Image (cartoon, rainbow, N blue to C red):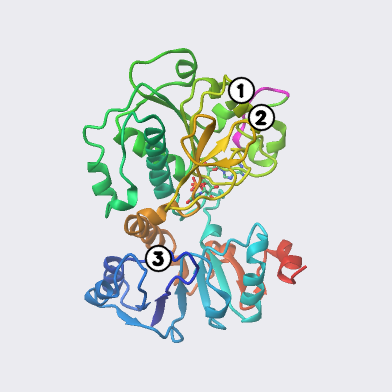
């Protein structure tokens, strides 16, 4: 018998998401009778304790007898139970300074850490994540911000709806003016954005037409890697070469800034990748973008005027076109930026359901198998208090250096 514990989220601000919904726990009991699920009491989780009880799940405070503990965000150090196996997003693999002490504590407490972010298919594609609902919420918030700025239409807040289903109903009868929207990226975030574009009845057009033509209805262009980057010498794009040598590529997005009203950004970005535009570009009278939904939320990253996180409560800020400083949103002299790091938390039930489904479908068999698993081994950053193979590059970080 294996016992899974769904821990209470301890990070502040409190996250409402959970790795398995009550219905999924019930499904596990029927289909995997050797697995028991326990849930730690929580006042902030999107599913009430009583819903787990109704699904036949034990709700308790004490998680010490669980074999595997599932969380979402980083677990506060004082709540880590020694000698356990944890799965959560640790945000340590890029040596993030703000989580260095967390990794040290995990090692000290002889814990095994399997990081959801490191669960990858053999080709390196990530298996589970919340990107799709980040794209949904981010695209909605981007449209809402543009509507607020221009007064052309009014969208409600996502979190005033109990579910994605309800949110969709609020789009009925909405009339969007003939604007142009650029959507970047090809992962889960971009797919969520495209879902909103289609639900709003916005037409997709090809890059050449988007750049050259005028439309009497709203349109969007979907820009993937091959549309956005070209090799500095050959002018060509190869996905694998770009992933290996991003510094050898130029970004070609600059030409889109003159015709775009809203940018919905969902690309993967790291320091070596050319930015979508330079910060100074926002000063130019040719820079037409008024609203940027930077769903990737890399501060100073592919969108250089991302000046840091905003919050779910106040998701939009302005960036002054001359001083590049943060301002109130919707000023004539600013570009609006929507940059929130926990977007899926506006639709926590849908996001949790989607996450739990992927977990059960793609990870459970390997996680509970007696045989060694490539998938789990690769995602294990710390094994019983020691850095695992493949994570030796974290040694100095783990030693506090
Ligand atoms: N704001 C939020 O709440 C939130 C939530 C989820 C994700 N995100 C962020 O959004 C971004 C996109 O997330 P996603 O869920 O779409 O990711 P994903 O893993 O689904 O897709 C990533 C895409 O980037 C490409 N890619 C992967 N490695 C690359 C590399 N080394 N070089 C170039 N391209 C590479 C892949 O081909 C893939 O198309 C990430 O930066 C992620 O952290 C933000």
Indicate which disc, 3 or 2, sits on the residue closer to the N terminus. Answer: 3
Q: Of helix, strand and loop, which one carries label 1?
A: loop
The front one of 381 and 52 is 52
Find the residue positioned furthest to the top: 213
For residue 245, side relative to residue 203 (left or right): right
Quadrant of the rendering where the C terminus is positioned: bottom right
Above/below status of 213 relative to 294 = above
Rendered location of residue 377, percent (x, y): 57, 66
**Hey, which quadrant is residue 141 in on the image?**
top left
Q: Which mark is residue 19?
A: 3
Magenta residue check for 49:
no
Could you tell me if residue 70 is visible in this image? yes
Q: Of helix, strand and loop, which one carries label 3?
A: loop
Which residues are the magenta region?
A: 233-239
Q: Which mark is residue 280?
A: 2
Q: Could you tell me which residue is drawn at 60 percent across and 46 percent down? A: 299
User: Disc 1 designates what residue?
Assistant: 284
Q: Are marks 1 and 3 in contact (CB under 8 Å)?
A: no
In 3D space, how far apart are the residues under numbered discs 3 and 2 (Cα atoms)?
Answer: 42 Å
**How many other residues sit within 10 Å of disc 3, few (<14), some (14-19) or many (≥20)?**
many
- Nearer the observer: mark 1 or 3; the answer is 1
In 3D space, how far apart are the residues under numbered discs 1 and 2 (Cα atoms)?
Answer: 8 Å
Q: Are marks 1 and 2 in contact (CB under 8 Å)?
A: yes
Q: Of helix, strand and loop, which one carries label 2?
A: helix
Rendered location of residue 243, percent (x, y): 64, 40
**How many other residues sit within 10 Å of disc 1, few (<14), some (14-19) or many (≥20)?**
few
The front one of 329 and 136 is 329
The front one of 165 and 113 is 165
For residue 332, side relative to residue 171 (left or right): right
């Amino acid at each position: 018998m294996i016992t899974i514990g769904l821990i209470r989220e301890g990070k502040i601000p409190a996250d409402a998401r959970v790795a398995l919904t009550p219905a999924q726990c019930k499904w596990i009991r029927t289909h995997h009778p050797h697995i028991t699920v326990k849930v730690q009491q929580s006042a902030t989780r999107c599913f009430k304790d009583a819903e787990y009880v109704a699904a036949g799940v034990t709700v308790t405070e004490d998680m010490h007898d669980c074999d595997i503990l599932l969380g979402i965000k980083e677990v506060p150090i004082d709540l880590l139970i020694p000698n356990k196996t944890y799965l959560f997003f640790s945000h340590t693999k890029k040596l993030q300074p703000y989580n260095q002490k967390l990794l040290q504590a995990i090692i000290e407490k002889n814990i095994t850490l399997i990081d959801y972010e490191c669960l990858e298919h053999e080709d390196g594609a990530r298996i589970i994540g919340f990107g799709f609902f980040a794209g949904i919420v981010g695209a909605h918030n981007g449209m809402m911000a543009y509507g607020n700025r221009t007064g052309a239409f009014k969208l409600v807040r996502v979190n005033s709806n109990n579910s994605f289903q309800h949110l969709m109903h609020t789009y009925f009868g909405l009339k969007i003016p003939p604007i142009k929207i650029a959507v970047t990226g090809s992962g889960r975030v971009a797919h969520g954005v495209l879902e909103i574009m289609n639900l709003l009845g916005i037409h997709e057009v090809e890059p050449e037409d988007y750049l050259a033509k005028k439309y009497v209805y709203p349109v969007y262009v979907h820009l993937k890697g091959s549309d956005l980057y070209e090799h500095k010498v050959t002018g060509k794009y190869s996905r694998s070469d770009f992933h290996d040598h991003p510094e050898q590529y130029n970004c070609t997005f600059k030409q889109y800034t003159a015709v775009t009203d809203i940018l919905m950004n969902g690309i993967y970005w790291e320091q070596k990748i050319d930015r979508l535009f330079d910060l100074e570009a926002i000063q130019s009278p040719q820079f037409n973008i008024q609203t940027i939904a930077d769903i990737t939320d890399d501060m100073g990253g592919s969108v250089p005027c991302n000046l840091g996180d905003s919050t779910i409560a106040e998701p939009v800020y302005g960036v002054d076109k001359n001083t590049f400083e943060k301002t109130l949103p919707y000023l004539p002299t600013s570009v609006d930026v929507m940059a929130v790091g926990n977007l899926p938390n506006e639709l926590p039930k849908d996001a949790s359901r989607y996450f739990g489904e992927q977990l059960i479908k793609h990870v459970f068999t390997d996680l509970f198998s007696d045989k060694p698993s490539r998938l789990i081994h690769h995602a294990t950053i710390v094994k019983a208090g020691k850095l695992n193979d493949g994570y030796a590059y974290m040694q100095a970080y783990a030693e506090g250096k």
